[in-house]
Amino acid sequence: MDRRSFVALIGSAFAAPFALAQKAGQLPRIGLLWIHAGASAPFIDAFRDGMRALGYVEGKNISIDERSLVGGYDGLAAAAARLATEKVTVILAYGGTAVSAAHKAAPGIPIVMVSAGDPIKLGVASSLARPGGSVTGFTSLNEDLSGKRLELLREIVPAMRRFAVVLYPGSATEAESLRNFVAAARTLKLESRPAEIRSAAEIESAIASIAKMEVQAIAVVGSSLFNANRDRLVAAIAKLRTPAIYTGISFAEAGGLIAHGFNVVENFRRSAVYVDKILKGAKPGDLPIEQPTRIELVINMKTAKALGLKIPQSVLIRANRVIE
């Protein structure tokens, strides 16, 4: 049986979990699965806000289970297995690695992804328009942005010849982001150097090692690990006094120089719509996977001044927001 046939078969197995939960006298339970630390607390708040707006009240007609939020990538597989064993109604997963772990551990449970790479390459969907299996939600497909981010960096740092790419190498999505940056760098005649971070404990040492690479700028790929430890990462990069571009706008809000990407918090809020539809009987395989429709550019002028950088007017006029 090929992958498309398997995904279609899994999709056909879904019934109406909300109705089943009601018959069993239990509240529908949403299991949360991603790397969590202080900086990712707004994600949970946004999802709860989205559910409340749709009429869900915790303890009354919904239960939200935070026990599978983990501190690092190495905990995702076990956390996903626990959610599968406990047969939660829906899994809300953030990040490609979490989505893959949930899909492998719990193929019969609907999964709403808040953000991930290419779900087709991850093997969890047949197509974006009609996923056909257990996974739906939002993808962070943005391969073309690697080149745009490098162009932004070069406008800000005209002398840039070499840059570092910060990533967790064990994520298929982040590894693909690295390949995209390498390809874009080749086109722009730039050199790239990977800077790998495998856990929160490695953030400071891995970033400090960039000083030996003789780079003029840093590109940080989208990562649930980095989002969860945003403040630590931004502070570590600030010590290098090297211009950096991030994919999440919250990084610029936290003191990063420039961010070019979508609003992850808003995706968490909008994920409630998918969960609601599934609880009311929709099959995840019939719900189209959405791509980012609004990419924002946020510039932190305080950081620019601290680095002694003058942001070109050509960049400022394209910014959605400038933090003074």
Image (tube, helix red, strand yellow):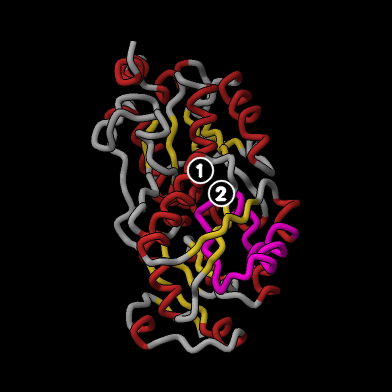
Name the magenta segment's main secondary structure: helix
**x 54%, y 51%: residue:** 223
Dot 2 crowding, Cα within 10 Å, few <14, some 14–19, many 20+: many
Q: Position of residue 24 (x, y in %)?
A: 50, 16
Tell me the element at label 1. Answer: strand
At label 1, the amino acid type is Tyr
Q: Are marks 1 and 2 in contact (CB under 8 Å)?
A: yes
Dot 1 crowding, Cα within 10 Å, few <14, some 14–19, many 20+: many
Image mark count: 2
In which quadrant of the rendered view does residue 230 lie? bottom right
Q: Position of residue 87 (x, y in %)?
A: 54, 20
Visible residue check, residue 129: yes
Visible residue check, residue 279: no
Name the residue carrying label 1. 94
Name the residue carrying label 2. 224
> On the picture, is 55 further left or further right than 129?
right
- Foreground mark, 1 or 2? 2
Question: Which portion, as a residue range, is magenta?
Answer: 205-234
Outermost residue, left side:
129
Q: Of residues 321 and 90, which is closer to you in this image? A: 321
